Amino acid sequence: MYVFRKSVLWAGAVVFAAVLALCFGLASYSSARASAPVPFTVVLDAGHGGVDPGVLGVNTGTKESDINLAIVKLLEEYFSEAGFRVVLTRKNEGGLYGLPTPGYKRRDMEKRRDVILKNEPTAVISVHQNNFVSDRTRRGGQVFFRDGDAAGTALAHSVQDRLNGLCGKELSPLRGDYYMLNCSAYPSVIVECGFLSNAQDEALLVTQEYRQKVARAIFEGTLAWLS
Ligand SMILES: [Zn+2]
C-alpha cells in the first residue's frame, strides 16, 4: 500500500505538471497564479442509498448501494492523496431525498445534480453495479457515457480499458441515456463495476481486496485520461 500511495502521489504530480504547462504555458508557470493552482475537482456519486438498495446480489443478497459506497470511499482516498478536490454526492448509507415520501427518487437524483452543478467538476464518476438476470454468465465492468460528450467518451474508454484488464474482457464503453449522465454538461461516466446477477462477480465484489482493484482501475483510468 505504501508503494502504491507513493506512485499515486507521483502520478498525480505528473498529471498536474502536464496540465499546468498546457493551460498556462511555460512562460507563466512561475507566476503567482500558477504557483497556487486550483486542483482538479472530481464528483464521486455512489448510486442508490437509503430505502433504495439498487440491485441485490444473486448469492447472498448484497445490496448494490453498499458496494457503491465502499468503492466510492476508496476512490475518495485515492483521488485525495493525488491532490484532487473530491466531492461526494452521498457520504453514508442514507439517500439524499429527505423523507421517503412519493417522488423521493426524483428528489434524490436532483440533489445529486445540484452537487455536480455547484462544484463545476473536471469529471463526474457515478458508481453502480449491474444486473442481467436473463443471462447470469455476463460479468465484468461496463462504462457508460453521454452521447455527444467527447471528453466523457474519452474518459469512459480509459476507464473501460483498465476494467477490461481486471476481468480479462474486451468490452467497449456504451452510450447511455441516464439522468446522471444527462443532468449536467460536465464530462460524466457511469461505471457499472460488475454484475450482481453473476455469482462470481458478487463473490468478488463483497471483498475489500477486489473493491480496491476496481477503485484503482477507475482512478488510474481517470489519471490516464487527464494526462
Ligand atoms: Zn445502480
Image (cartoon, grey):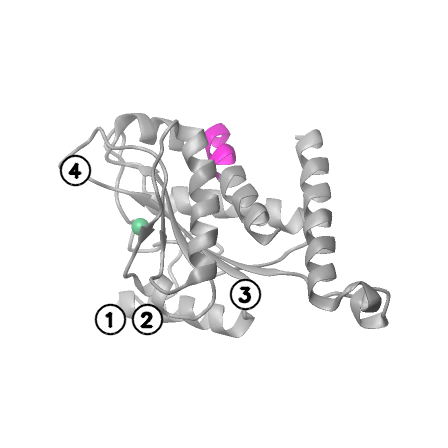
Q: Dot 1 corresponds to which residue?
A: 103
Q: Amino acid at mark 4?
A: Val
Q: Amino acid at mark 3?
A: Pro
Tell me if residue 51 comes above or below residue 165 in the rendering: below
3D distance between C-alphas at marks 1 and 4:
27 Å
Q: Dot 4 corresponds to which residue?
A: 133
3D distance between C-alphas at marks 4 and 3:
35 Å
Tell me if residue 184 comes above or below residue 177 in the rendering: below
Q: Position of residue 194 (x, y in %)?
A: 34, 37
Q: Nearer the viewer, residue 129 or 70?
A: 129
* Range of residues picked out in magenta: 206-214
Tell me if residue 196 comes above or below residue 179 in the rendering: above
3D distance between C-alphas at marks 2 and 1:
6 Å
Q: Position of residue 163 (x, y in %)?
A: 43, 37
Q: Which mark is residue 121?
A: 3
From the image, which quarter does the N terminus lie in? top right
Q: Who's the residue at 35% across and 61% down the image?
A: 146
Quick check: 18 left or right of 70?
A: right
Q: Mark 3 or 2 closer to N-term?
A: 2
Q: Nearer the viewer, residue 157 or 77?
A: 157
Q: Who's the residue at 46% across and 30% down the image?
A: 210
